[in-house]
Image (cartoon, rainbow, N blue to C red):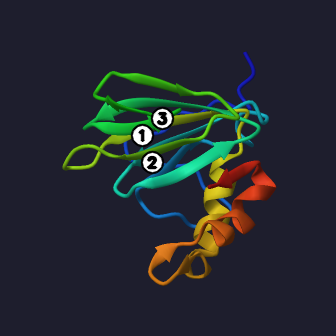
């Protein structure tokens, strides 16, 4: 076993990134940690995540607490603690909190890179909205280099 990539994070600990992210997004294993194979984040889904497509990565979501509402291919499903969701690349989907307090999930992207897109979005935070709502065109300026398109 090689020890140069071994990680053991304590509860609440997160990996450092290129840009600061809100506490609702905690990187557990970055793309660099996994040699690009995947990235893992613990996320509190406090706000709706608009409909979008991951063109390069499959997204996996494991619900730790609360309920997550998932919209995919015209269907709406609810996932609760212990439930697992696979969102295949190329398929538009949206996520939103389905409970109060909001759901806490483990989010895995394979290959990695999702945390990089989030870092770019949060770095450009003030420029992502128009008229008080997220602007898909402005979001896409930050996410398209990472293979993600908001609809």
The residue at the point 49 percent across, 45 percent down is 94
- 3 or 2: tag closer to the N-terminus: 2
* Kind of element beneath mark 2: loop
Circles 1, 2 touching at the beta carbon (< 8 Å): yes
Most foreground residue, 86 or 131: 131
Frontmost residue, 22 versus 50? 50
In which quadrant is the C terminus drawn? bottom right
Give coordinates of residue 128: x percent, y percent: 59, 75
As drawn, which residue projects farthest toward the front?
74
Mark seen at residue 74:
3
Residue 120 image offset from top left, x and y in percent: 67, 65
Q: Residues within 10 Å of mark 1 (few under 14, many from 20)?
A: few
Q: Is 132 located above or below residue 45 in the figure?
A: below
Instruction: Evaluate whether residue 114 shows in this view.
Output: yes
**Residue marked by disc 2:** 13
Q: Earlier in the sequence, mark 1 or mark 3?
A: 1
For disc 1, the marked residue is 10
């Amino acid at each position: 076993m090689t020890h140069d990539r071994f990680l053991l994070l304590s509860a609440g600990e997160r990996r450092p990134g290129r840009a600061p992210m809100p506490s609702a997004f905690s990187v557990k294993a970055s793309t660099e940690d996994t040699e690009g194979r995947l990235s893992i984040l613990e996320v509190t889904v406090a706000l709706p995540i608009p409909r979008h497509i991951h063109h390069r990565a499959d997204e996996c979501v494991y619900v730790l607490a609360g309920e997550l509402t998932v919209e995919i291919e015209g269907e709406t499903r609810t996932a609760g603690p212990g439930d697992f969701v696979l969102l295949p690349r190329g398929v538009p989907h949206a996520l939103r909190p389905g409970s109060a307090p909001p759901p806490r999930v483990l989010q895995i992207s394979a290959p990695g890179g999702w945390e990089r897109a989030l870092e770019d979005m949060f770095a450009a935070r003030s420029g992502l909205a128009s008229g008080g709502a997220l602007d898909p065109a402005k979001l896409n300026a930050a996410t398209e280099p990472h293979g993600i398109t908001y609809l």
